[in-house]
């Protein structure tokens, strides 16, 4: 004992066992059922899009972090989440080179340029998608039908389009419920809508799986349930009022909740810890803001869907929300 | 629902390892080291000379002013030297070395008792100071200072703190089980000294046996309530305890006095009840020695001034010990060496092996998860404080983020999934700001 060397540490000397990579890994687990659902809906196309999305995000993260420091930061698993989430927001027939390009832009511009994990002001997955939306609007709004018979043996021709070439859509495109609502005034709630068996982005229609994944994370304390609750509550409330005032013009709450990327955005995108507020009251304010923006864009905007822009705008406001909703004292004090 | 405070954390308590072990008298070390500054405030003034013989319990250092307290000889023996000795903080401090007399029966010398019925409140407060009693929960704040109530303050409640929320430590638990009579005697002295009309003993719900032992013996003439509290860290901090028991919030920078309460640790209360009727001074205390690197875990009544090396040799230290800290793992301080003495504020030692310390995971950037915000019992913003600390903006931390309210409970660092040294950086910021002020 006389020659014992003692370590000196600063208190506390014990830790809860929570860690960033553990949280991130669990988010990946929570997304896996949704990925499986996407594969069931779209077959090989979904496999390829998700794979390319994840690989492009992780490779970008690895390459950029290695360019500055010796250690790669892909071990924190955050790039995998970005890749999966990004992939799940894409149309199943999107040319793979666009998928790769968007993944690169999302991580490089949306995350690494700000300083990497913990410093990204915006959800990197949505930055990648927003870039594609701006650069290739036609490809981002061409929807492939779900549950085609040959989905496990062939892929849409557009998927393998040569970079920078105009992709060839084989003429079997389909419309999403939101497009139909926007341009054809079809607001009916059908069983297909609730079950998610309609065309759309890869992962946006599996409402039940999204909610189950979110519930798992919330139960483990890895997701602030107040954010999706506020988003969905606001959208449901606002659309209930609007549709009761003018039923023909505005979609009702059930249609609003189950169409488009609302569920996926509310549960998995808006809850990006880095880009969302710190306190519970701040989280609720942030969620309400997203919900209101979604309703405004969907009802009166030029685009059928507004979840992505609503979340990105709220991401930008998040630091200001933080400043107003400090812990302890209520914001109005 | 048991009363408690908002926020806080639930670390594993590890109390089962020692709470069933009765307090065991510790042997006397051949050499005792008694630092003169074992309490908050001014160090005591030595009143013995080198070579002088002392009797166990004899006063060897007097309080130097009101914010100071006395020291008593932990053994019968001779004063070997008065000079510098290593301390827990690493710096050398003034202290008295005592050589234990071999073959002595180590009877405790007695002086004039402080009689409960005839003494005035002032006489009790003076007796507590003369007995060298300080808060035994770990803060080592002189108890008599807490009891001197300023003219403009009114105290209605005496709170006895039997929460003991630090993991591993079970000294208060054992004292409540084994010395209930001393505790109630101590309460009588304290009530008379501070003028409180009612007494609440707060105990965490993981010690039902202690609560029962005390409840059974409540004297009919005292207004004492035993209140179980939810098990949550840091329930034992004064502010959290008052919030849970009385629903009162101590203002920032304020004292329990500001909300009409005095809070005294239960082991301190027991010492008062034990020492004052006998006219003795405090020269031993109960400590928990526990942790994975300890072979004979348990609770020990140990002479104050026992060198830690002697204590740990007796309790058996594992070969692969890697870290020893004073107090519990949440707020305890790592020791630079084993050659430091046990002082009045030492509530225990916990020793970790390499298994526990090597497992410490690597850190990540802050991901803004908000766990720390939900953990902080003071509703501070550790996330923002940490960000400012990393940028070196210490003034901002104090001006906008209430840095100086933080009492370093460690809850934020405990929950941080990025394993950031939050508390450590707050401590650093405070000390830099304090230095800049002087």
Image: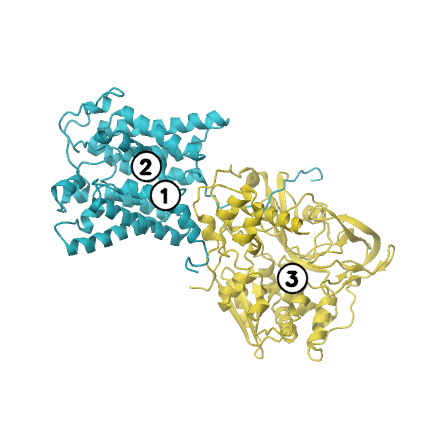
Chain colours: A cyan, B yellow
Q: Quick check: marks 2 and 1 in contact, CB under 8 Å?
A: yes
Residue position marked by numbered label 1 in the rendering = A315
Q: Secondary structure at mark 1?
A: helix
* Protein chain holding label 2: A
Above or below, comparing residue A210 to residue B240 in the picture: above
Residues B435 and B322: in front is: B435
Image spot of residue A78 (x, y percent): 40, 35
Residues B353 and A111: in front is: A111
Front label number (3 vs 2): 2
Instruction: Report how far apart the C-alphas of labels 3 and 2 lie in the structure.
Output: 56 Å
Q: Tell me what residue is drawn at x 49 percent, y 61 percent.
A: B205
Q: Tell me what residue is drawn at x 23 percent, y 27 percent.
A: A44
Answer left or right for B342 relative to B264.
Answer: right
Q: Residues within 10 Å of mark 2 (few under 14, many from 20)?
A: many
Image spot of residue B30 (x, y percent): 78, 51
Q: Which badge, 2 or 1, comes first in the chain's sequence?
A: 2
The N terminus of chain A lies in quadrant: top right
Answer left or right for B164 relative to A98.
Answer: right
Q: Which mark identifies residue B135?
A: 3
* Protein chain holding label 3: B
Q: Tell me what residue is drawn at x 33 percent, y 33 percent.
A: A128
Q: Secondary structure at mark 3?
A: loop
Q: Quadrant of residue B123?
A: bottom right
Q: Which mark identifies residue B282?
A: none
Q: Quick check: marks 1 and 3 in contact, CB under 8 Å?
A: no
Residue position marked by numbered label 2 in the rendering = A126
């Amino acid at each position: 004992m006389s020659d014992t060397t003692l370590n000196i540490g600063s208190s506390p000397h014990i830790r809860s066992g929570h860690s960033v990579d553990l949280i991130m890994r669990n988010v990946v687990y929570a997304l896996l059922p949704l990925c499986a659902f996407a594969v069931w809906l779209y077959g090989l196309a979904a496999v390829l899009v998700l794979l390319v999305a994840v690989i492009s995000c992780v490779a970008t993260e690895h390459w950029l972090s290695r360019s500055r420091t010796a250690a790669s930061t892909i071990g924190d698993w955050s790039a995998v989440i970005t890749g999966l989430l990004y992939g799940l927001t894409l149309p199943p027939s999107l040319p793979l080179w666009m998928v790769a390009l968007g993944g690169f832009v999302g991580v490089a511009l949306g995350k690494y340029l700000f300083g990497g994990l913990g410093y990204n002001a915006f959800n990197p997955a949505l930055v990648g998608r927003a870039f594609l939306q701006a650069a290739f609007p036609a490809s981002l709004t061409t929807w492939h039908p779900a549950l085609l018979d040959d989905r496990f043996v062939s892929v849409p021709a557009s998927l393998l389009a040569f970079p920078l070439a105009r992709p060839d859509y084989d003429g079997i495109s389909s419309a999403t419920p939101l497009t139909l609502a926007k341009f054809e005034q079809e607001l009916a709630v059908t069983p297909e809508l609730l079950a998610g068996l309609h065309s759309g982005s890869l992962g946006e229609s599996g409402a039940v799986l999204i909610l189950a994944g979110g519930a798992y994370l919330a139960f483990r304390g890895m997701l602030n349930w107040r954010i999706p609750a506020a988003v969905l509550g606001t959208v449901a409330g606002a659309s209930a009022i609007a549709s009761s005032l003018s039923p023909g013009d505005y979609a009702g709450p059930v249609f609003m909740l189950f169409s488009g990327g609302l569920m996926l955005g509310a549960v998995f995108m808006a809850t990006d810890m880095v880009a969302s507020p710190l306190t519970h009251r701040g989280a609720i304010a942030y969620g309400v803001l997203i919900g209101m923006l979604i309703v405004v864009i969907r009802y009166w905007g030029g685009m059928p869907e507004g979840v992505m822009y609503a979340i990105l705008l709220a991401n930008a406001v998040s630091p200001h929300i933080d400043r107003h909703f400090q812990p302890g004292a209520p914001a109005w004090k | 629902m048991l009363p408690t405070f908002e926020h806080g954390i639930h670390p594993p308590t590890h109390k089962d390892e020692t709470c069933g072990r009765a307090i065991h008298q510790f042997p006397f070390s051949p050499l005792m080291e008694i630092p003169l500054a074992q309490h908050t405030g001014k160090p005591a003034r030595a009143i013995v000379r080198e070579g002088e013989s002392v009797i166990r319990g004899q006063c060897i250092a007097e309080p130097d002013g009101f914010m100071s307290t006395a020291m008593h000889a932990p053994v019968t023996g001779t004063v070997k030297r008065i000079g510098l000795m290593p301390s827990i903080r690493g710096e050398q401090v003034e202290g008295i070395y005592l050589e234990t007399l071999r073959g002595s029966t180590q009877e405790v010398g007695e002086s004039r008792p402080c009689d409960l019925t005839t003494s005035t409140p002032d006489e009790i407060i003076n007796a507590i100071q003369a007995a060298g009693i300080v808060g035994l929960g770990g803060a080592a704040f002189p108890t008599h200072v807490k009891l001197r109530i300023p003219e403009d303050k009114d105290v209605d409640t005496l709170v006895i703190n039997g929460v003991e929320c630090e993991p591993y430590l079970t000294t208060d638990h054992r004292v409540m089980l084994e010395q209930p009579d001393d505790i109630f005697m101590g309460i009588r002295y304290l009530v008379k000294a501070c003028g409180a009309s009612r007494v609440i003993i707060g105990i965490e719900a993981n010690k039902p046996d202690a609560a029962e032992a005390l409840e059974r013996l409540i004297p009919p003439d005292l207004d004492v309530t035993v209140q179980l509290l939810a098990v949550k860290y840091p329930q034992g901090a004064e502010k959290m305890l008052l919030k849970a028991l009385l629903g009162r919030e101590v203002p920032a920078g304020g004292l329990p006095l500001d909300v009409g309460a005095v809070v005294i640790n239960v082991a301190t209360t027991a010492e008062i009840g034990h020492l004052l009727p006998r006219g003795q001074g405090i020269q031993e205390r109960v400590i928990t020695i526990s942790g994975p690197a300890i072979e004979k875990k348990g609770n020990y009544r140990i002479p104050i001034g026992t060198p830690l090396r002697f204590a740990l040799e007796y309790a058996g230290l594992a070969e692969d010990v890697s870290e020893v800290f004073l107090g519990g793992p949440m707020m305890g301080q790592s020791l630079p060496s084993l050659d430091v003495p046990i002082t009045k504020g030492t509530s225990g030692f916990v020793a970790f092996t390499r298994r526990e310390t090597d497992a410490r995971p690597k850190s990540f950037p802050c991901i803004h998860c908000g766990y720390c915000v939900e953990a902080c019992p003071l509703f501070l913003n550790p996330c923002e404080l940490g960000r400012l600390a990393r940028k070196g903006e210490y003034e901002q931390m104090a001006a906008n983020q209430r840095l100086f309210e933080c009492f370093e409970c460690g809850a934020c660092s405990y929950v941080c999934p990025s394993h950031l040294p939050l508390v450590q950086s707050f401590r650093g910021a405070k000390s830099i700001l304090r230095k800049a002020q002087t």
